[in-house]
Image (cartoon, grey):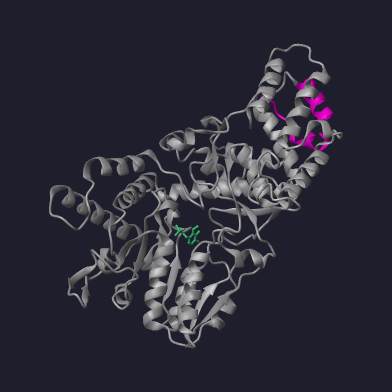
Amino acid sequence: MDNKEKNNLSHLKELLSEHKVLYEKEVYKYLKSFICNRFGLEESSCETDDILELAELSIAKREQLIDEGKLSEDEAPNLCSGASTALSKKILFLITLEKNLNIEFLPEDIPYIRTIKDICQYILGRQQQFIKKSITSDDVLLFDLPNNKAVLKENLLNLDKIRSDFPILKRTIYGKPFIYLDNAATTQLPFTVIQAVYEFYQNYNANVHRSLHFLNRKTTALLEETREKIQKFINALYPFEIIFTKGATESINIVAHGFGEVFIKPGDEIVVSEMEHHSNLIPWQEVCKRKKAYLKIIPFDDNGDLVLDVYENILSEKTKIVAITHVSNVLGTLNPIKKIIELAHKKNIPVLIDAAQSIRHGIVDVDDLDCDFLCFSGHKMMSPSGVGVLYGKKKWLDKIPPLSYGGGMIETVTVYDAKFKKLPYKFEGGTYNTGGIIGLGAALKYLEDIGFEKIRQYERALIYYLEEKLSSIMGIKFIGSPRERMGVVSFIVENIPSDDIAIILDEMGIAVRSGHHCALPLLKHYNLNSCVRISPAFYNTKKEIDTLIEVLLRLPNIAKK
Ligand SMILES: Cc1ncc(COP(=O)(O)O)c(C=O)c1O
C-alpha cells in the first residue's frame, strides 16, 4: 500500500472512530479514490461504481500493460492485489478495508455488497458494531463430535502450554493473529529446539568426526547420541542403519542412485504409486531412463485409496523395488504399507517407504513393518530444515554405493583410488549439518515428552472437526475421501483459483498451501492443476479452524448448507 492510500484510509478510520455524523458522500470519496488506486486505475476515467466492473477494468489494464511491455507477467502490484479473477479481487479489496478500517463484513452480506455505495452504507449503518476479533488460548477445544468429545474435553494436550512453547505462534501477520495451517509443508519449531541449535553454535561448534579437541569430541558425541535416539524412535536394529542426509529427497535419491546402479538392468521394473510426491517419483524415472527399465504405477481410486488388486498383479519377477509413500501429502491417505510390504516380500522384492508425512505422527516402526528403506525429513517433525534420515537394512546398505564422495567417508585414499568407511559413514560424505541434527534430536525429545499417542488423538479430532466444518459449506469440493486420513485435507472451490483462495486467507493471517503440492500426477487424476491444502498440527486450535471457515464463507460461490 503506498502512502497516499494509507493516508486516505487512516483518515477515514479516524473519522469513523470519532463517531461523528458522516455523510455518505464523504466516505464515498475516500473509498473511490482508494479502490481506483488499488486497482491501478485513473479515478477520473472510472465511471462505474460497481466493484466487479472495476476489478475487470483492472485486469484488462494489467493485460494491456503486459502487451505493451510496460509490466512483466510476474509483476502484480496494486493493479492486481495478487489475485487473478474479479471475484477474488473484490474479496481482497473488502479484506483490505476490514484490516485498515477495523471493521468486519459479515459473510452472508458479502454477495450483496456490489458497489462502492453499498460499502458506504454498510460502514455507516454498522459503525458501532465492528470490533476486531482475536484468538486467545481459552479457545481451546471443546468439540461436539461424539467420538471426539472425551478426547477434547480433557484438554489432553494442555494447549496453552504447548502454544507458548512455539515463539512463532505469538506473532501477527498483517496485524492479525497468525494461524499456521501449512504443517504438511513444514512444521514450526518449539523454543527448546531453537535453543538446542543456538547452544550448539554458541558452545560446541566443531566439525564432527574430524579433530580430537574437546569441542569436537563433545559435538561428535551429541551427533551419535542423536543417531541412537532416531534408531530407537523408528525401532531400527542398529544405529549404523541410520544415515543423516539433507532430507527425504536426498535420502530417496541415495537409494534410487545406489540401488539403480547395482540392481536395475534393462527391462526391469520399478513400482511406485500414482500418489507419490515428485521426490519419490522423479529419482525413479531417472533410474528407468538410465537403465532402460520401466516404471509401473499403482493407481488409486477417486476416494484416494490405492487399488491393491492392481498392485498385486503388477508385481512380477521383473519387479526390482517398490517405492511408496506412507501418507499422501495431498489426500492424507494412510496407505496399508504393512500389507504392501508383505506382498512385495513374498516375491523377494525390497520396499522403500517415503515417511515424510507420517514421521511426526510416531507411527513408524521399521522392525514391525519390515521395510527395506525408509526416508524422512526433520523439518516435518518440528526440527530445523536441511536435515533428514535414510534408514536402510544393513544387507542392502552394504551393497549399494554412495551418492556423495569426498571427505569424511573414506578409510584410505591414494591418488588413484579410495576405500570407503563402513556404515553409516560411507553415505555421509562432507561436513554434517550438525546444528540441524542436534535440533532434530531436541525435536524428537519434545514430541516424546508430550506423547505421540496424545498428539495423534488430538490431531485426529482436529482433522474430523475440519472435515465436518468444510462439509457444511456448499461450493467446497474435497479432493479424495480416503478410508484412513492423516494430517491434511485438500479441496477446491469451483470458479475460484486455489491460489486466490490462499492469497485471501493469507490476507487474514492464515497460512495454507495452494498449488500442485509437488504431486502433479495425483492432481491430474482429478483433472486439476491446483488445490488448497489445510494441514493442522497439535498446536492448532478449534478456534483457528473456525476462523478459517469464517473467511472461506466470504468467498463468492460459497455458502453454508
Ligand atoms: C510425501 C513427501 N515426500 C517427500 C517430500 C520431500 O521432502 P523434502 O523436501 O524435505 O526433502 C515431501 C515434502 O513435502 C513429502 O510430502
Residue occupying image coordinates x 80% and y 37%: 51
Nearer the observer, 16 or 1: 1
**Position above or below: 338 against 161:** below
Image mark count:
0
Q: Quadrant where the C terminus lies?
A: top right
Relative placement, left or right, of 423 versus 116 is: left
**Position above or below: 81 against 10:** below
Nearer the observer, 492 or 304: 492
Residue occupying image coordinates x 61% and y 70%: 300
Relative placement, left or right, of 248 versus 45 is: left
Coordinates of residue 493 in the picture (x, y in percent):
72, 51
Relative placement, left or right, of 221 versus 315 is: left
Coordinates of residue 454 in the picture (x, y in percent):
45, 47
Q: Quadrant where the N terminus lies?
A: top right
Q: Is residue 143 visible?
A: no
Determine the main secondary structure of the stretch shown in magenta.
Answer: helix
Residue occupying image coordinates x 23% and y 51%: 222
Nearer the observer, 230 or 178: 178
Coordinates of residue 18 in the picture (x, y in percent):
70, 12
Quick check: is 117 in the magenta stretch? yes
- Which residue is outermost to the right? 47
Nearer the observer, 313 or 325: 325
- Specify the quadrant of the image occupied by residue 13: top right
Magenta segment range?
102-126
Residue occupying image coordinates x 40% and y 51%: 385
- Specify the quadrant of the image occupied by residue 546: top right
**Position above or below: 311 against 477:** below
Q: Is residue 280 visible?
A: yes
